[in-house]
Image: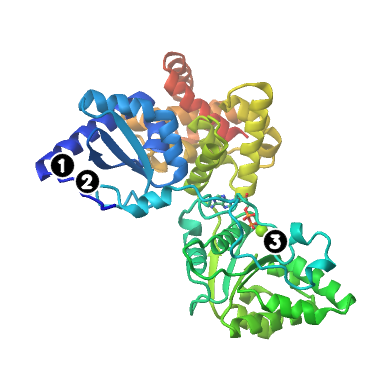
Amino acid sequence: MEQVAVPISPSAGAQLAEVWARIRGRLRDEVGEVEYRSWLRQMTLSALQGDEVVIHLPTRFLRDWVRGHYGDRLQALWHAELPAVRRVEFRVLPDARTAEPVLEAVPAEARAADLPVSRTAPDRGLAEPLGRPAEARPDAKLDARGEWSAPLDPRFTFDTFVVGKPNEFAYACARRVAERPASPGFNPLFMYGGVGLGKTHLMHAVAWAIRERGDGRAPFSVAYMSAEKFMYRFIAALRSQSTMEFKESLRSVDVLLIDDLQFLIGKDNTQEEFFHTFNALVDAGKQIVVSSDKPPSDLAGIEDRLRTRLGQGMVADLHATTYELRISILQAKVVQAGVAVPPKVLEFLAHKITTNVRELEGALNRLIAHANLFGRAVTLEGAQEVLHDVLRAHDRRLTIEEIQKRVAEHYNIRLSDMSSPRRARNVARPRQVAMYLAKQLTTRSLPEIGRRFGGRDHTTVMHAVSRVAELMQQDNAFAEDVELLRRMLET
Ligand code: ADP
Ligand code: MG
């Protein structure tokens, strides 16, 4: 079918943009700034086609979330503005944020990106029973996939990998390798980073993507395994005197992914074997992907010649997560789980659990499981309770400086304003909040607190404390804000 651009004159386009801005404004008023920013900000208007409005979102999670939670409301708002509009359609367009706001029919690729990928499709790209003949293995059928490749986690795909600054380079490299295995410059692909930052996830994603190439290209055989498993298999082959088989079968794969290579440190025989496999595959134009917790240069205990080869393709690191990435990951996980978790709880988790994604996920899962078990909604209070022990690990003595810093960040003022003589409301109020929290959360006396806030008198601190308490009584949103700050600082 032909894609027909809907002709929209510039002035009509401008009008439409205005309508859209009004609708977004109304929605923002209704749901509040935080919720709006968390879920709705990334909507882009793509097209108005007859009675249907098409809105793009950059990920499938956001699309499902927005459609599920705000779909009806958006439709009503559109209908109120333009009575001809009867339907609002949500679609995924990965770079919707940067896309030109072209008002035309949605391109075919955007729709293709929207189709769910079947995980149960026959394994076109599987390494067919390699090694020993099938009859030697009673579980051959069951094990056809697992013989060489360890099972792949169905959750670890490119779709479910949330991309942010710390991992975008590794992600781009992984995608590139999945699309065009063994391209010059990308072989081997060596990905490294700390625990729980997504190395295994990306490796599985590459393997899935290559297995599922469905556009008529020749199937690839893919073998994924940990370095540890590689070693065990090699040792088993040595014992059963089947090393030839081991070598041949492994060398017949098109793409070999070895996870956690650091495991081979000090295991000389296995390294040797891996080195030969590695060379044979690369020389035959096959792709190797390796992950490790360190860059090749830091892999002490790995033979020099192997280390050199490992660094000869593309080396990509996964950096520690940022707050933004943690929020995006949590949002994605919440949508996947199909559970309503208030944005404040997600912010709380992202502030508190900064170590790695696995812990972050674990904490969120515990909250959800707990809420399900007791048939309760997930709340900030509940979160703090359930995660008590996780959070206690991060526990330490709070200082007034930390309070000032966090409060200044929260209200977007300068840290120096905490001790400046300025009395403008937009700095005075946050300063009072910080004083209040300092009184609540530390054992400092009023005069001591006053001194840390630019040498203020203790009566000023006293006034601030009672003023904040009073405001919290009167203003729910303000109270929630202070409460959130307190929880973040406290545990
Ligand atoms: P590593 O192998 O680096 O130790 P994993 O790949 O096992 O880490 O990741 C740990 C957990 O965190 C997994 O459940 C994974 O899905 C999740 N995870 C890590 N990074 C991301 C990300 N960017 N987006 C979504 N999930 C992630
Ligand atoms: Mg791993």
Task: Identify the residue under disc 3.
Answer: 145
Residue 210, percent from left and from top:
55, 64
SS class of the residue under badge 1?
Answer: helix
Mark 2 secondary-structure assignment:
loop
Identify residue type, mark 2. Answer: Leu
Q: Is residue 432 left or right of residue 265?
A: left
Q: Residue at x 70, y 61 (%)?
A: 145
> x, y (%) of residue 43?
34, 40
Disc 2 packing (10 Å; few <14; some 14–19; many ≥20): some
Residues under numbered marks 2 and 1 in contact, where contact means CB atoms less than 8 Å apart: yes
Q: Residue at x 87, y 79 (%)?
A: 241
Q: Position of residue 292 (x, y in %)?
A: 65, 67
Give the residue pinned by disc 2: 103
**Relative to residue 196, is residue 430 drawn left or right?**
left
Q: Nearer the viewer, residue 129 or 185?
A: 129
Residue 25 screen position, x and y as percent? 27, 30
Q: Amino acid at mark 1?
A: Gly
User: Which sits in the foreground, 484 or 63?
Assistant: 63
Q: Quadrant of residue 196?
A: bottom right
Where is residue 79, by image quadrant?
top left
Q: Can residue 485 be seen?
A: no
Q: Which residue is mark 1?
A: 13
